[in-house]
Structures are given as structure tokens and as C-alpha cells.
């Protein structure tokens, strides 16, 4: 299992950054095109990124310091919903917030990274001014026996 | 990997039919006819899409006796995999922009 760790300084208070992790309108301003969020422990975390359905649950919600979600792909055998875990830790600073991100439990199989890389490709494509954005296509990674439970 | 590879791969992946074809040849090498049946498209259309995917380095060809088969190219996947490292930095940069824009009002 692989992990990814990074951090970024944001010139906005933790409360504002926190809001971007728990409200659908603000979520899609930085990640994905559709979000269905229920920010309580055990609540739904569903974001479509470039048509790829990322699904999980909110595991920890501590306003405005910390959000932990489980993270996987709907319908994927290699990278199912809940298999990995993303921790957002918001540390107040004089200029705003340092956001620390830790993504653990990333599977290392080709198929799984393929799915993630794909999402990244497609979201880049959507944000590209010169591109021709593809419509949502949640079907391409979903096997027919495992239909979407959390339709957004 | 250089920028040209990425642009070609992006264009190849922009088409939902090509993404369906890639998903089908991810696990095992298949002939054009088998792919066409799996994605419910004509062989002619599948051949066209395979040509684009091949040029983008995302599928490779194999010969098994008289059979001409297509399979996802793992080197192509590595290009995609390299991109994974960009996923969170790209999105967190967007989060920073969104949060700071909100504060500035």
C-alpha cells in the first residue's frame, strides 16, 4: 500500500478552508463536477471527478481543524469505496491556514492507479481552456454487477 | 514523458467510446471483433478508435498465430501513473485559489 503526503499554505482562515471540504458547492469549486456530501462521521462522501465516481464516507469531522474521509472508486474491485483514507488537517497560521494532506492505503495495482490517473487526466481536460470537456461518464469503470448506490 | 505525449493521450481519452474500449482490453488481449461485440459498436468504428489509442501509446498489438489482438500498453499506463503524483497538488492548488477568492470577496 502506498501513501501520499503534501501540504499547502492558503491565505484564508481554517473556517473557510473547512467549508470547502464539507459543502458540495464549495467542493466542486476545486475538485470534481458533482458532489453529494453528508459531513458527519459515517456520512456520505461522493464526488465525481472527470466523470469518475469517487466514493467513501466521512470518518472524522472536527470543525474547523480536521476532516478524514474514506476514498475509493464505485464499482472498482481493485480500488473499492472506502479502501483508502484521506486526512485533511487544517493548521491556523498568521496568514491563514496550512493544509496538510495524507492519503494512505493507496493500492499499487496497475488497474487501480490507472483509475486514479484517469480521473486526473480527465479533470485536467475539463479545466483546460482549449479542451473539449467530456460529459460525465460514470459507466466506464463500473462493472455491471455493482451499480451505483449513492447516485449524485 | 513530455508534453506532447500528454496532449495526445488526453485527446485519446476524451472520447467515452475509447475509454470503454480501453476498459475492455485492460485485462486480456482481444481481437477487433471481440472488442466490437463487448462495446456494441461496429468493427470499423472500433478499428478507428484502436488506431487512435495505438498512436497515443495506450494500446499495443499482439499476434497469436493468425489472430491479431489488442491490449492496454503498460508503458502507457506508466505515463498515466506518473500523473498520479500530480493529482493532489493540482487539486489543492485549486482549493487554495477557491478559498482565497472567497476571502477576498
Image: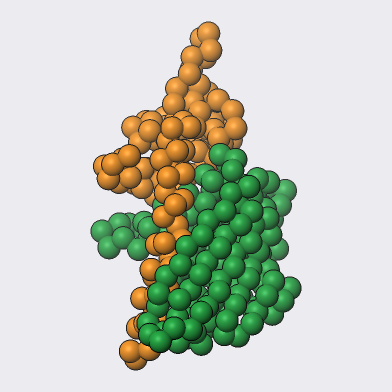
Chain colours: A green, B orange
Camera-nearest residue between B49 and A70: A70
Identify which residue is drawn at 50% across, 38% down. B22
Identify which residue is drawn at 72% across, 76% down. A41
Return the x and y of residue A66 as percentages of the image width and height: 60, 77
Location of residue B38 with respect to A31 vertically, above or below: above
Camera-nearest residue between B97 and B6: B97
Identify which residue is drawn at 51% across, 79% down. A91
Taking the view exactly as shown, the residue that stands out farthest to the front is: A94
Quadrant of residue A150 within the rendered picture:
bottom right
Return the x and y of residue A97 as percentages of the image width and height: 45, 81
Location of residue A142 with respect to B53 vertically, above or below: below
| A132 to the left or right of B50 | left
Camera-nearest residue between B32 and A91: A91
Tag count: 0
Quadrant of residue B35 within the rendered picture:
top right
Quadrant of the image containing the C terminus of chain A: bottom right
Identify which residue is drawn at 63% across, 68% down. A69
Quadrant of residue B59 within the rendered picture:
top left
Asked if residue B65 can be seen in this view, the reply is yes
Location of residue A2 with respect to A30 vertically, above or below: above
Taking the view exactly as shown, the residue that stands out farthest to the top is: B65
| B18 to the left or right of B23 | left
Location of residue B90 with respect to A92 vertically, above or below: above
Camera-nearest residue between A69 and B28: A69
Return the x and y of residue A73 as percentages of the image width and height: 61, 55
Asked if residue A12 can be seen in this view, the reply is no
| A110 to the left or right of A143 | left
Amino acid at each position: 500500500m502506498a501513501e501520499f503526503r503534501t501540504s499547502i499554505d492558503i491565505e484564508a482562515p481554517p473556517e473557510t478552508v473547512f467549508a470547502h471540504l464539507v459543502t458540495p458547492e464549495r467542493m466542486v469549486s476545486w475538485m470534481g463536477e458533482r458532489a453529494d456530501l453528508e459531513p458527519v462521521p459515517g456520512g456520505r462522501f461522493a464526488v465525481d471527478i472527470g466523470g469518475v465516481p469517487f466514493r467513501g464516507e466521512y470518518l472524522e469531522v472536527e470543525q474547523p481543524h480536521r476532516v478524514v474521509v474514506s476514498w475509493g472508486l464505485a464499482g472498482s474491485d481493485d480500488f473499492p469505496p472506502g479502501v483508502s483514507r484521506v486526512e485533511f488537517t487544517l493548521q491556523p497560521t498568521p496568514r491563514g491556514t496550512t493544509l496538510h494532506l495524507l492519503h494512505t492505503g493507496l493500492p499499487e495495482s496497475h488497474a487501480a492507479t490507472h483509475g486514479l490517473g484517469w480521473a486526473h487526466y480527465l479533470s485536467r481536460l475539463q479545466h483546460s481552456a482549449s479542451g473539449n470537456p467530456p460529459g460525465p461518464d460514470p459507466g466506464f469503470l463500473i462493472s455491471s454487477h455493482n451499480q451505483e448506490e449513492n447516485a449524485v | 514523458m513530455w508534453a506532447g505525449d500528454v496532449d495526445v493521450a488526453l485527446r485519446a481519452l476524451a472520447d467515452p467510446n475509447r475509454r470503454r474500449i480501453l476498459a475492455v482490453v485492460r485485462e486480456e488481449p482481444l481481437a477487433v471483433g471481440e472488442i466490437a461485440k463487448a462495446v456494441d459498436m461496429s468493427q470499423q468504428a472500433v478499428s478507428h478508435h484502436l488506431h487512435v489509442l495505438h498512436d497515443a501509446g495506450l494500446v499495443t498489438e499482439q499476434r497469436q498465430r493468425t489472430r491479431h489482438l489488442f491490449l492496454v500498453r503498460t508503458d502507457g499506463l506508466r505515463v498515466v501513473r506518473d500523473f498520479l503524483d500530480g493529482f493532489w497538488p493540482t487539486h489543492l492548488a485549486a482549493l487554495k485559489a477557491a478559498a482565497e477568492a472567497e476571502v477576498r470577496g
